[in-house]
Image: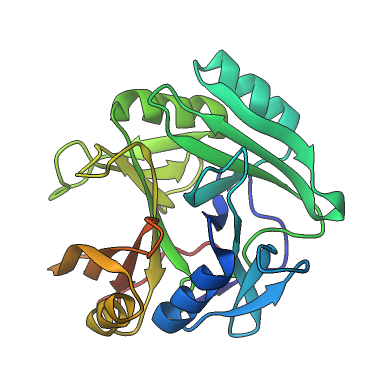
């Protein structure tokens, strides 16, 4: 379990949000599957909302826009969004949108790596990003699925300082990611593994993966990969009613989770 009240170190995943064509319906779906509560940040059915898990902000959910055509986005922390934008271009990527000031909350940037995978960058202001991770309903892991994993990993290293590590039993072409001066992984990167396009897959911790799958299908979602036992826990990949892919995961009893506190 991890709670956080200070800005995330540069390079670490610090936030995720969903851009949905129907935010109100999406809120109902994820409330049914993950037990989420919401704090609306504006008026109307398309208002951006903060996801609340056990009283702490865990993620965001809002409408599609020019920067986010749809689906889940992972944001890596940055101390200087403008410098990150320049580094992304120098590393062979491109700036999709930003940097843009989001009032006192912080600055946001979207960059695409050479494979086309879009990553968000967040320079904290009043909003540090997620205040809770590794608890039921909150983010526990994130994978970058790429058509060119080596190019994506080189981009993440050059722009965000993330190093890649292999490990025994890893699926073909998959590595973990970590900050250069840390030993604990903070995510992973690998081939598409059946994903329709490059991008991040976000994993949410749940107490029962099978129950989450049943709730998702009952609420109008679909199963992309059925529940499966792995060395890292029982997990499944789901698609919400509007096509956004995400994963649910129940960690093995007593298994340590990435410490991002």
x and y percentages locating residue 57 in the rendered image: 65, 72
**Between 62 and 86, the one nearer to me in the picture:** 62
x and y percentages locating residue 148 in the rendered image: 29, 26
Question: Furthest-right residue in view?
Answer: 104
Q: In the figure, is residue 259 to the left or right of 150?
A: right
Q: In the figure, is residue 220 to the left or right of 71?
A: left
* Residue under the point 57% across and 65% down: 23
Residue 80 seen from this side = no
Q: Quadrant of residue 141?
A: bottom left
**Between 132 and 105, the one nearer to me in the picture:** 105
* Residue under the point 75% across and 60% down: 127
* Residue under the point 66% across and 26% down: 85
* Residue under the point 60% across and 36% down: 110
The C terminus lies in quadrant: bottom right
Query: Is 37 located above or below residue 187 in the figure?
Result: below
Q: In the figure, is residue 135 to the left or right of 146?
A: right
Residue 144 seen from this side = yes
x and y percentages locating residue 197 in the rendered image: 32, 37
x and y percentages locating residue 1 in the rendered image: 49, 77
């Amino acid at each position: 379990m991890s709670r956080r009240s200070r800005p995330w170190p540069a390079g670490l995943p610090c936030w995720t949000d969903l851009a949905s064509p129907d935010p109100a319906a999406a809120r109902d779906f994820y409330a049914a599957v993950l037990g989420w509560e919401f704090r609306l940040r504006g008026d109307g059915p398309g208002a951006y909302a903060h996801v609340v898990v056990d009283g702490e902000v865990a993620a965001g959910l809002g409408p599609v826009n020019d920067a986010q055509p749809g689906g889940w986005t992972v944001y890596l922390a940055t101390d200087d969004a403008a410098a990150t934008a320049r580094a992304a271009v120098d590393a062979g990527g491109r700036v999709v949108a930003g940097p843009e000031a989001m009032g006192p909350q912080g600055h946001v940037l979207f960059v695409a790596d050479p494979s086309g995978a879009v990553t968000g960058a967040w320079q904290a202001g009043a909003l540090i990003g997620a205040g809770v991770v590794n608890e039921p309903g909150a983010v526990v892991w994130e994978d970058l699925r790429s058509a060119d994993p080596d190019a994506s990993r080189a981009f993440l290293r050059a722009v965000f300082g993330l190093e890649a590590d292999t490990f025994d039993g890893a699926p073909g072409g998959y590595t973990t990611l970590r900050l250069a001066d840390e030993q604990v992984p903070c995510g992973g990167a690998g081939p598409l593994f059946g994903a329709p396009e490059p991008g991040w897959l976000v994993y949410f911790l749940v107490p029962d993966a099978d129950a989450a799958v049943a709730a998702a299908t009952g609420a109008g979602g679909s199963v992309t990969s059925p529940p499966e036992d792995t060395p890292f826990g029982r997990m499944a990949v789901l698609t919400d009613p509007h096509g956004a892919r995400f994963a649910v995961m129940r960690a093995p009893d007593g298994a340590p989770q990435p410490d991002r506190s």
